[in-house]
Image (tube, rainbow, N blue to C red):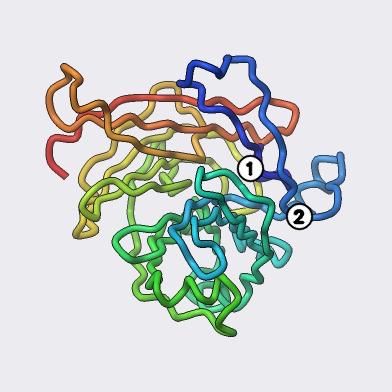
Amino acid sequence: GADDEQHLGVFEDPTTDNAADTTPGTLVRLLEGELPHDKSKRKKAKPDLETLAQLPPLPGCPAGALLALGSGSKPQRETGVLVALDVHGVPNGRMATVDLCPLYAPLHKRFTDLNIEGAFVLSGDLLLLHRGNKGDALSACIRFDWNLIAPWLAGREPKPPSAKSVQLMDLGEVEGVPLGLTDGTALQGGAWAFCAVAESTDNSYHDGACVGSAIGIVAPDGKLRHIYPLAGSPKVEGIAAQRADKESSTPGDTWVFTLVTDPDDPHTPAHMLQTRLELLRI
């Protein structure tokens, strides 16, 4: 899975004319060193980069940046990487590591098994998504004021701001296993979408069987509006959303959701999935 690596994978847009289905991606190294080949040793050593957020302009990154965050589930998983982008949205070769310990320390006091799996900017806030599990079923949305946290991420401030709010979220269950947040993405008007999986494990460290997965919609007021189960229960851990063509004959407000799976095995390719949802009222 992608969180088992120390690189960023960059791929051509498969919808463009010059991109073939077989076009390989390129790797951009984020962290130095090599991970062990042994699966158990690899799990202990990996940085667990579970999130990849596209950021607006911030100090030192006038065209924006990508932010990869370690999950915080173990001490070695508290490193982030800020990747500067050029005006075309492509990594420009400049990057910096971010020590997440001071950001995560207050969250560890709130969550005994912290597991940050998603991050994105929405309505002037940076949202971090904590994933629940069978041991502690509730997931959470943690908000930071973007204008306060951006200078810290850029290394211009010594201390990160405190969280603006922490919202606990009950996403329901599948076969007695709670759904937990695995990523999120902004929609319009302050609404956002997430992907979630029901993985049969009691903690953030061990993998388990995925018995269900879903896309969810959260309204601007923070209320969970819709849960859409995914056929086949793919273990989706990445999501992006794009409004469908306005000239489409499909009625309503249609969004195209692109999802990526995590097979928990570096020898097994991930899958990119797409689905359309008509969101009449958010």
Q: Quadrant of the N terminus?
A: top right
Q: Position of residue 103 (x, y in %)?
A: 55, 74
Q: Secondary structure at mark 2?
A: loop
Residue 18 sits in quarter: top right
Per the image, label 1 sits on a secondary structure element best described as loop
Return the residue at label 1: 207
User: At label 2, which amino acid type do we have?
Assistant: Leu
Q: Nearer the viewer, residue 119 or 93?
A: 93
The residue carrying pointer 1 sits among few (fewer than 14), some (14 to 19) or many (20 or more) residues within 10 Å by Cα, namely few
The foreground one among 181 and 253 is: 253
For the residue pair 199 and 235, the one nearer the viewer reads as 235
Q: Measure how far apart labels 1 and 2 are at the Cα level.
A: 24 Å
The first of marks 1 and 2 along the sequence is: 2
- Left or right? Give the position of 179 relative to 109: left
From the image, tell me which residue sits under label 2: 31
The location of residue 20, given as percent across then percent down, is 58, 15
Identify the image quadrant of the C terminus. Answer: top left
Instruction: Reply above or below: 17 against 27.
Output: above
Residue at 51%, 40% (x, y): give it: 237
